[in-house]
Amino acid sequence: MRKKVLFISSTGGHLDELLQLKPLFQKYEYNIVTEKDKSNLNLKEQYGKKLYFLPYGTRSKLFTYIFKYFYLCLKTIYLYIRIRPKVIVTTGTHTAGPMCILGKIFGSKIVYIETFANTNKKTATGRLIYPIADLFIVQWEEMLKIYPKAIYGGRIY
């Protein structure tokens, strides 16, 4: 039986980075979770039942974001129970935070890849996940000064 691995990220650049890991997908019993957005609905054709969507929310609309984020957390619990991953791999951001925390509570290994776009400061999700990550990977050597327990993995792109 192949190991269950969940790949999760928000939409946009974080999802682009996550999809660079596609060669790994076939080595595992995998699922992908991302935010539902017009730009990525076509992924359903490619990944079918392996792809799940969480609600898309932006902090610029704070009032509705609070409700969407609450729903996101509830759906995260549902998806975690449904998938039961042994490993969670993420490139961030806020969409992945609740899944990583839930996964850590229930014994999943957490692999966090800090975004390529960040070269000299911690991201909010990076700060949250760094203490609980089993493997924390940075894409810039300079980031090792900021995350001393991280591993330099090179660039995903």
Image (tube, rainbow, N blue to C red):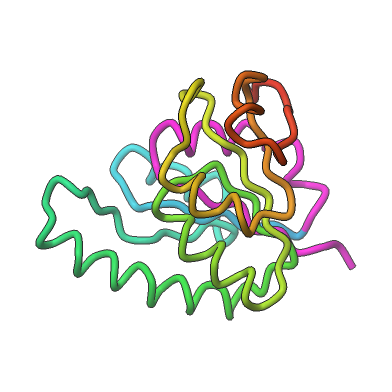
Identity of the residue drawn at 57% across and 50% down? 47
Q: Residue at x 58, y 31 (%)?
A: 146
Q: Is residue 130 left or right of residue 96?
A: right
Residue drawn at the location 67% of the way across and 19% of the way down? 141
Residue 64 point in image, percent of width and height = 13, 62
* Region in magenta: 1-28
Residue occupying image coordinates x 46% and y 65%: 98
Position of residue 45 in the picture relative to residue 2 (left or right): left
Q: Is residue 27 magenta?
A: yes
Residue most toward the right? 1
Does residue 130 show up magenta in the picture?
no
Q: Nearer the viewer, residue 2 or 88?
A: 88
Figure quadrant of residue 80: bottom right
Point out the image quarter for the C terminus: top right
40 lies above or below 143: below
Query: Residue 17, image x and y in percent?
Result: 55, 32
Instruction: Judge left or right: residue 126 versus residue 148.
Output: left
Comparing 31 with 47, the one in front is 31
Query: In the image, residue 51 lies at what x, y percent?
Result: 53, 56
Q: Where 11 sits versus 103, above or below?
A: above
